[in-house]
Image: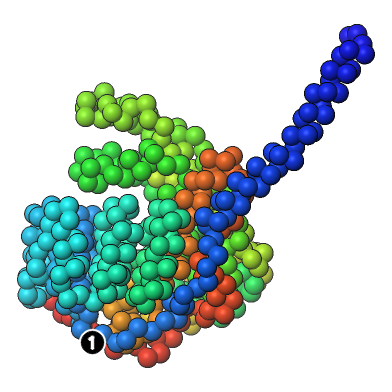
Amino acid sequence: MKYNRRNFLRSATLLSGAVATLPAMAREARSNSESWMRDTQPSRPQRFNMSGYAAPKIDQVRIGFIGLGQRGPGAVNRMSRIEGVEIKALCDKDPARATKAQDILAKSGLPKAKEYSGEEGWKDMVANEELDLVYICTPWHLHTPMSLFAMEHGKHVACEVPIAVTLDECWDLVETSEKTKKHCMMLENCCYDFFEMLTLNMARNGMFGEIVHAEGAYIHDLRDLNFSKTGYTDMWRLEQNASRNGNLYPTHGLGPIAQCLDINRGDKMDYLVSMSTNDFMMGDTAIEKAKEDAFFQPFVGRPYRGNMNTTMIHTAKGKTMMVQHDVTSPRPYSRIHLISGTKGVASKYPSPERIAFGHEWVKDAEMKELEAKYTPPLIKHVGEVAKQVGGHGGMDFIMDWRLIDCLRNGLPLDQDVYDGALWSSIFPLSERSVAKRSRSLDVPDFTRGAWQTNKPVDLTLEGGATTGVRKTG
């Protein structure tokens, strides 16, 4: 092609103009990045460190429950079995659910609780009842508003996962807990499962050496439940999957491995990248459902969340964590729970649970020896009765019993507000990274530097284990 002087001068002019715009583009990109950082990491210092905080002892823990649909009735049943608990109030938007939950108390020989219902019933309950603890089992978007309201009214909080769905909510929870000195525990039950607690104690005792990498997940085919008219009230969980694209439910897989890595207590999450597949399942499911029932027609053609999300997290000490989320693929349930160190590895899924200190998994006899030696005191103390009471094999009861025992004995909680905020923050952070073509994002330090001196989760039961279990029937 002929390349004459006019073309050369024109190209040079365009190039010089493009070069001239680079500093402005860089400033704009830096400005956007800095604005994002201002949103994620406020400059104000920590008001009070809730990690390791021991609130005054509560001999009789008075509880009010909000949300009696999917998770609430099970929580009422478990708490009815724990000594030192008084179930004072039951609240649900649907008054029939609050009334039905009274049957649980009657079967346990406990007095009736006061019932609250309606859209604002939970506010009346929190404001008017003399409660020590508000136990929240509602849809995700209500978790933070309810937790904040409870703390502001002088109550401790125990809330289902995730405890927040935006970064602003995460910071609101942290700052309100610090201001009120009220516990705000996210009810991450998987931290209390038997193998997770075994591997945590083994990690604490150096059995895996220096932990280099860990993996967690929530892989659970929930299509039938998400598309069920009676599964989640007002189809709220399906709506979340249709409107947000990232790791919507990170904490079940993340919580246990974060504890093994002493995150917030010796190390911190530094930055992450997140990537989602396209949707190959939910849109098709909506189409098939609509063919059979016109009720599902509004769900056809919506841009559903990608089926598999994978989020990689790098820590300040150079460790890595992988967290996956998939609630649509036809595959076996898995939370992965893999801990990989310089001396060994543990893996929960697929079954059976396995541990190795070389190139081969340990045999059954050695596995039993490890369990006998490294099962922590909490599991030895209440594990068997937990299996009888139930709740995901017993881990739910262990979590609830431990919470009550800590409150009654004035002990720090195993999961504080910083853990709940951090683990939940992966939801909005992953969403932003996915939207930005897997851009690397800094993870907020909700402890504002206190992670460097915070003590690891206490596994000794020292000062506690005074709470009994009620017999029923």
Vertical arrangement, residue 297 with respect to residue 60, above or below: above
Quadrant where the C terminus is found in the figure: bottom left
- Seen from the viewer's position, the closer of residues 266 and 213 is 266
Task: Choose top left, top right, bottom left or bottom right for residue 302.
Answer: top left
Q: Amino acid at mark 1?
A: Asp
In this rendering, the count of numbered labels is: 1
Vertical arrangement, residue 79 with respect to residue 406, above or below: above
* Residue at 38% across, 84% down: 54
Note whether residue 150 is visible: yes
Position of residue 85 measured from the top left corner of the image (x, y, whole percent): 20, 79
Position of residue 412 measured from the top left corner of the image (x, y, whole percent): 40, 81
Instruction: Name the colouring of the figure.
Output: rainbow
Note whether residue 194 is visible: no
Q: Residues within 10 Å of mark 1 (few under 14, many from 20)?
A: some
Q: Is residue 336 left or right of residue 213?
A: left
Element type at mark 1: loop
Position of residue 261 measured from the top left corner of the image (x, y, whole percent): 56, 69
| Residue at far top of view | 2
* Residue at 20% across, 84% down: 60
Position of residue 458 measured from the top left corner of the image (x, y, whole percent): 46, 82
| Residue at far right of view | 5
- Seen from the viewer's position, the closer of residues 359 and 386 is 386
Vertical arrangement, residue 407 with respect to residue 39, above or below: below
Q: Which residue is mark 1?
A: 59
